[in-house]
Amino acid sequence: MNAAMEQTYRIALWQGPSPEADIKAAFATLGQAMRAAAAMGAKVLVAPELYLPGYNQDQVTDLAQERGGEWHMRLSAMCMAAGCGLVVGYSEREGAARYNSAVAFSAEGVELTHYRKIQLFGPREKRLFSPGEAYAVFDFGGIKTALLICYDIEFAPHIAALAAQGVKLILCPTACPSPYEYVSRAVVPAHAANHGLTIVYANYCGIEGDCNYFGLSVIANPYGELVAQAGSGPALLVADVPVSFDPSRLATQARDFRPV
């Protein structure tokens, strides 16, 4: 099979400022972005980490909602109205525990999977949230897909474990501030190439409290190519990513590795 014969899947990514706990504005922005993505033929829109209610907010755990609650019902309805799937980060409540979570919906408004961040970053996240304990792998339009959140994507063992399960697409909401631009510029593309999969990395831009988000959201394909990358301001990226890959262009580290 050559590159010209590859099948592709159209994905959108929304990069914008935090809604800063303005839930009404957050839903309005998501709805607008989903409608625009659908108009360009995208099957799913990926939005940043903890977009509901905003990452660096004092109320981030106070405003947390249960899985399947009001936020989920509204998001499901928005997907149906726009005709576009959605992956978005949110603050989850389960009993006394709080989680940094993400949820994926189909264009029909069906919840496809739910994920809790495994690798909590820094003392603030570890104080506010409990860590997740499992991967979320699911079928998304015929592609074996997984969710990760922000810091998770920086750990090669997680990427390798997902690739070993046959995952070909990782959708990753993030909230990454300066000075960690290297994650978008180097880490994400390298993981995509080394493990033979596509990574969609959706960041914020702008300032939220003491977080200066650098933007640079990126879609990196399994050939080590940056299919699309945002700058430092608001952006809606739309790109076609491979569903079936040209094996002659894929890295072979997984089968060539020699432990010593």
Image: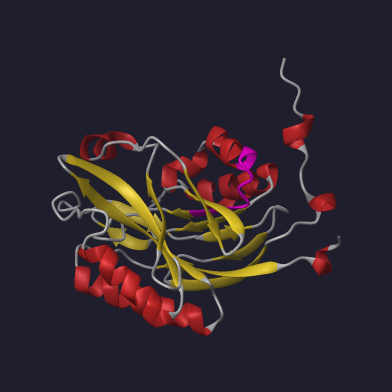
Vertical arrangement, residue 58 with respect to residue 226, above or below = above
Magenta region includes residue 41: no
> What's the residue at 42%, 48% (across, down)?
149
Q: Quadrant of the N terminus?
A: bottom right
x then y, percent, for residue 186: 59, 47
Residue 100 visible, this angle: yes
Viewer-closest of 69 and 190 = 69
In the rendered structure, the answer to whether residue 228 lies left or right of residue 78 reads right
Please report the residue visible at 41 percent of the width from the left and 81 percent of the height from the top: 82
- Residue positioned 26% across, 54% down in the render: 67
Q: Residue 132 occupies which quadrant of the picture?
A: top left
Q: Nearer the viewer, residue 84 or 178?
A: 84
For residue 121, above or below residue 196: above
In the rendered image, the quadrant that contains the C terminus is top right
Residue 162 lies, in percent from the top left, at 57, 41
Residue drawn at (24%, 74%), measured in percent from left and top?
25
Q: Give the range drawn in magenta.
A: 163-171
Q: Is residue 179 visible?
A: no
